[in-house]
Image: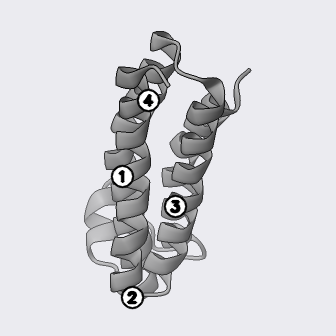
């Protein structure tokens, strides 16, 4: 299996990792209304939940870009490199979000978004 497909899997797991940070160690977690419970959290837990939500938002665009690049026959090295860069940017994004560094977090988000655009570009240009 190509590296870029593994990156789709990793991107799909990132939301689970971040929401786990939000829920970890809390006995009052309400599985009946998890979103309402998460909305009441503050600090690190709230930031982890927001990162969780953003990972879900970023996932479809990224997965579509990888699949489009694969389907159009773009060079595998470009696809894998951009997919790995996206994952690296998202991991950094998560760390920056959890550590409450919003300006750097936005920069990391932008890098990840640029990787997705790059995947579409290599699809269109057949690089």
Residue at x 48% of width, y 28% of height: 66
- Front position in the image: 119 or 14: 119
**Left or right of residue 44, residue 35 in this image:** left
How far apart marks 1 and 2 lie (CA) works out to: 26 Å
Q: Find disc 2 in the rendering and name its residue.
A: 43
Q: Dot 1: what SS?
A: helix
Q: Which is nearer the N-term, disc 4 or disc 2?
A: 2
Q: Closer to the observer: label 2 or label 3?
A: 3
Q: Dot 2: what SS?
A: helix
Which label belongs to residue 30? none
- Front position in the image: 30 or 58: 58
The answer to whether mark 4 and mark 3 are in CB contact below 8 A is no
Which label belongs to residue 89? 3
How far apart marks 2 and 3 lie (CA) works out to: 22 Å
Q: How many marks?
A: 4
The answer to whether mark 4 and mark 2 are in CB contact below 8 A is no
How far apart marks 1 and 3 lie (CA) works out to: 9 Å
Q: Which is nearer the N-term, disc 2 or disc 3?
A: 2
Q: Dot 3: what SS?
A: helix
Q: Find disc 1 in the rendering and name its residue.
A: 113
């Amino acid at each position: 299996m190509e590296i870029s497909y593994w990156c789709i899997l990793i991107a799909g797991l990132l939301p689970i990792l971040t929401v786990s940070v939000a829920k970890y160690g809390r006995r009052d977690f309400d599985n009946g209304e998890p979103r309402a419970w998460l909305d009441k959290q503050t600090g690190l837990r709230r930031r982890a939940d927001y990162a969780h939500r953003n990972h879900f938002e970023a996932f479809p665009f990224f997965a579509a870009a990888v699949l489009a690049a694969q389907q159009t026959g773009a060079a595998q090295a470009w696809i894998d490199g951009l997919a790995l860069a996206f994952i690296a940017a998202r991991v950094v994004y998560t760390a920056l979000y959890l550590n409450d560094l919003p300006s750097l977090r936005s920069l990391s988000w932008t890098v990840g978004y640029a990787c997705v655009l790059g995947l579409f570009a290599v699809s269109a240009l057949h690089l």
